[in-house]
Image: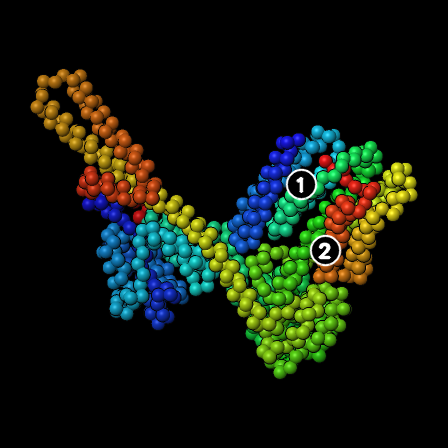
Amino acid sequence: MLVGDVFHMRIIVVGLNHRTAPVEVRERLSFTRDRIEPAYEALHGGPVRECVILSTCNRTEIYAVVEKYHAGLEAVKSFLSSFHGVERAAFEDHLYVLSGSEAVTHLGRVACGLDAMILGETQILGQVKDAYMAAVDCGAVGKVLHNLFEHSLRVGKRAHSETGISQNAVSVSYAAVELARKVFSSLQGRKAMIIGAGEMSELTAQHLVQAGVGEVIVANRTWERASELAARFDGRAVPFSEIVDWLSRVDIVISSTGAPHVIIKYDAMREALRARRFRPIFLIDIAVPRDIDPEVQSLDGVYLYDIDDLKSVVAANLRERQREAEKVEEIIREETGVFEAWLNSLEVVPIIRSLRQKAEDIRKREVQRAFNKLPDLTERERKVIEAMTSLIVNKLLNDPLLKIKEFANGSQGRLYIETVSELFNLGEREDESDVAKVEGGG
Amino acid sequence: MGYEYVLYGIAILFYGAASAALVGYVYFKRWGQWARVLTWAAWSLHTVALLLRVVETGRPPLLYLFETVSFFTWLVMLNYLVLELVLGLQVVGVFVVPVTALLLLTAGTLPRGALAAAPWLHGSWVMAHVSLGVLSYGGFALAFIAGVMYLIQDWQLRRKEFRPMYYRMPPLEVLDSMGYYLILFGFPLLTLALLSGSLGAIPVWGGAWGTDPKVIWSLFTWVIYALYLYLRLVRGWGGRRAAVLAVVGFGAVLFNFFVINLYMTELHRYVNL
């Protein structure tokens, strides 16, 4: 029986995400860090040989290696229901269930951020890793999931390094920084001026400082707020009236005041540009109504973006990521192939061993029977018969065994393995210790 | 000479294919690797064709118009390939490679006039003059491309149109200083080319060369680049205006090379095959 289970070992994923389930459902099925150990205790064991729980704010997914598909699926579903105290009817319609190579591909897509709310986000890769580590700590991971998660982490890393799936900002404040990078060869040591100390300008300034901007100048109507913000960035606060003077000395301006009128006028900007000898200046105007006269855009070296412009950059960036998604799918396909070849090879070893074992058992039994019928055989005659029967068995098995190894790496590998196992009725012969060896780390 | 035509034909085909792949690269980044392979293949064939010519004739390939164009585009490609290796600016190739393909194709199909092998063309002054001129044009050509790229990216940043090309472009400041350094490299070479030309011409042509249209036009070109450097170094120019000037300067070079050489000058006419 046990060998048969090895052959029927399946990887399944049961889960729901931001697309299939509303937040009311997702929150009821999510796993918090402090309850993860009891969760593994309840889930691991029985039909669930190995498992990893991946729970983020956008998804709850259970990856499991099960002996029997239906029994395993039932076990996972009833675990979700009983552990969270939620009736199955409340979430069952939102669940997706994938198995075999579809499950493997799915985890790859999750790890790369293809399945994420924001295409190509990188946070999920860390969450996949954390989930895997937590499962390892709880002793719920065996050989199969260990390899599966290593595979998915590799896929994620390749996707981020070999494609542009996670490049180009998809948040407004970060998009501003990237735009600045398209103008200036480096942000190292540049000066930035923040006008109006709002939350948005603070966030943008933070990104700018991280990107290397050297000095931050803050101008605000209320002096206290200006000095407070300046202190945070190790910068300096300047009076509101000095803004125009500073235009010739800074490279980046972020403006977000609540002023009802324009603060930076066309003439002032033109003067400033002359003073800065037409070195480019980068202006972000997040205020509504706008703080900077849009006319200044016609001046040489002025790059001005308002909030709508930044939003359109984000939209364009997402389209650009979409283009890269195809390449990521290719990487996933490639790596999934590698993983499945490994999985099949894992199954082919016990198949070969039990096929050999079965043949050898038959041979020995039949030879013994023949010897019993022919007690007068000399030692030499016995040896010849032994050798001949061995030879027949080996020659007969030689081709099938070679072919099994070969087919196991093909796309239909599992089918061949199962066929061979059925054909030779291998499910009932092996003893327990052998299986334990095959499963190793389990 | 048949094999040479075949080599050039294949090289042009490869340049064409590389151009197509580079355009594809603008839209799909991964096409870049194919573009790179094709570009190197094209340039290698180009190199072999040029080397064969040099070995066969035992002189720099600067006597015929086609040779000169071939050598010039080869040089520009060399500059570009170095730029790509060092700075990773494959996007420059989107402009350089198609222009190379077109120039080679145009030069290969230009009308052929009477053979006029002038003995004075082989003098060392002349060779120095021509080599320096072509080297300086190589610098100006890339400065021109940096200028065009600057204007395109500047336009995209102002119009807030974020097309695929926007993502491939380097920062404006990089394009700006790229143009500057290339002109800084080309200008002294052009100056030396003009000087060596004048010195070499005195014993051959006497005073008559002073009114040759090519000489006048070359001086005009020199003035444009001198102005570029003056405005940049003294007046602090840069950015869009400098880019426009780099484009105008190379326009003058192209006019000199194709129009004046072919139709207007007697003294500087290329020997036709």
Image-based side of A225 in relation to B58, left or right: left
Residue lying at 70% horizontally and 30% vertically, measured from the top left: B55
Dot 2 or dot 1, earlier in sequence: 1
Q: Secondary structure at mark 2?
A: helix
Quadrant of the rendered image containing residue A4 = top left
In this rendering, is residue A346 above or below A125?
above
Residue projecting furthest to the bottom = A260
Q: Position of residue A199 (x, y in %)?
A: 56, 74
| Residue ID for mark 2 | B247
Q: Residue B108, which numbered label?
A: 1
Three-letter residue code for mark 2: Val
Residue A314 visible in the picture: yes
Image-based side of A198 in relation to B234, left or right: left
Q: Secondary structure at mark 1?
A: helix
Q: Position of residue A145 (x, y in %)?
A: 35, 51
Q: Chain of mark 1?
A: B
Residue lying at 23% horizontally and 37% vertically, measured from the top left: A354
**Quadrant (top left/top right/bottom left/bottom right) for the N terminus of chain A:** top left
Q: Chain of mark 2?
A: B
In this rendering, is residue A209 above or below A331?
below
Image-based side of B106 in relation to A153, left or right: right
**Dots 2 and 1: beta carbons under 8 Å?**
no
